[in-house]
Amino acid sequence: MRTASGIYRQKLDHPGGRTEIVIGAGALSGEASGLADWLEGRTVFVLSTPRLAELHGEVLESLGGAAARVVRLEVPDGEQAKSLAHAGRLWDEMLESGGKRDSRLIAFGGGTVGDLGGFVAGCFLRGIEVVQAPTTLLAQVDAAIGGKTAIDLTGGKNTVGLFHHPARVIEDTALLATLPRAELRSGLVEVVKMAALLSPPLLERVEQELDALLAADAAALAPVVAGAAAAKCGVVERDPAEGGWRRILNFGHTLGHAIEGALNYSHLRHGEAVAYGMLFALQLAHSRGLDETLGERLRGLLGRFELPPLPPLEPADLWALMSRDKKATESGLTWVLPRALGHGEMVSGIDRGEVFQQLETFLPDPFARPPFSL
Ligand code: GLY
């Protein structure tokens, strides 16, 4: 819902209660009074990174204003922060500085800070309340909403974690102005992922406003972030613990994660790898009877993203990585395949031979029109 001040408000009801989501330019300063009760008389831990302190020092300083005590916690920039070693160090710092069961934590950063901050808060003294203040588009449209938290093990990303829903998610879209274009592109892929299967009007908006969105136009971004947040909330409310339907959000992620792993998390950002994963899912869906209209439309849209090229990859390596991804279950891989605009389905039991055959044609030319259909 859009308020008169141009700020969007969304509620997410989940088994642990309700998360308030506030979206728009200036949302963080606007929400200071909303956070006052939550902070009053308490210690608040504010988790961030050196780069964010440099970029948004003033905003960072202002967080936790109404608290009795503000304790700043810092982790390095990048995925390396999501380790058990950093989580352990943060817990020690929190305990040593007098953290209690009713202390609070604010995670100010991208998906890495959000995942780690949520995990640290969810485990500290068996759980303290957290507010997520995501600073990247990817975190605002997806990662910060829905309670997933995680750290990485050597064997895989996000392999240890828990559901710990934030009390509030404050998405200040003004912070997106400092993001590089590639980071905006990566976040917008997650918007396309949700829009294609859940919200045709959102897809149309992204198609119409893509240039403004990639240029970090604040007026264009706020309604798109709000639209994606609403789509995500609808999915999470229906299936908070990812028992089934929530896996719809994995469209493009089965192959996307494997591509990231095969490239050692270099060359492509998460959303860029997911874009290739979506293109492959479209090819698989097409070979199983998907009408080509949606494929054409999404290939056209993703083509405008000017993705970095997909480096050469081997089907066997990708298959091995997909099979041991945390999204694989004992019964094998589940693919999220589009059925039509606004509709997707989970498909299991696609055998290795079929995936290999499709990868052989896909990898050399991911944007090519699929070669055949049933
Ligand atoms: N990012 C996918 C989910 O929250 O389920």
Image (cartoon, rainbow, N blue to C red):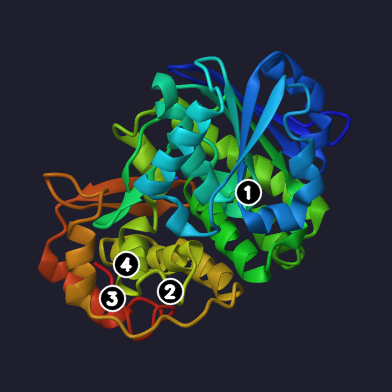
**Label 2 or label 1, whichever comes before in sequence order:** 1
Label 2 residue SS: loop
- Left or right: residue 229 versus residue 295 is right
Q: Nearer the viewer, mark 1 or mark 4?
A: 4
Return the mark for residue 202.
1
Marks 1 and 4 close (CB-CB < 8 Å): no
- For image coordinates 77% across by 59% down, the residue present is 177
The location of residue 232, given as percent across then percent down, is 52, 38
> Is the CB of mark 4 within 8 Å of ligand 1?
no
Q: In which quarter of the image is ligand 1?
A: top left
Q: Give the CA distance from mark 2 to mark 1.
A: 30 Å
Return the mark for residue 266.
2
The quarter of the displayed image where residue 211 is located: bottom right
**Label 1 or label 4, whichever comes before in sequence order:** 1
The one of 117 and 347 positioned closer to us in this rendering: 117
- For image coordinates 77% across by 22% down, the residue present is 66
Q: Give the CA distance from mark 1 to mark 4.
A: 30 Å
Return the mark for residue 372.
3
Q: Which of marks 3 and 4 is in front?
A: 4
Query: What amino acid is at disc 4?
Result: Gly
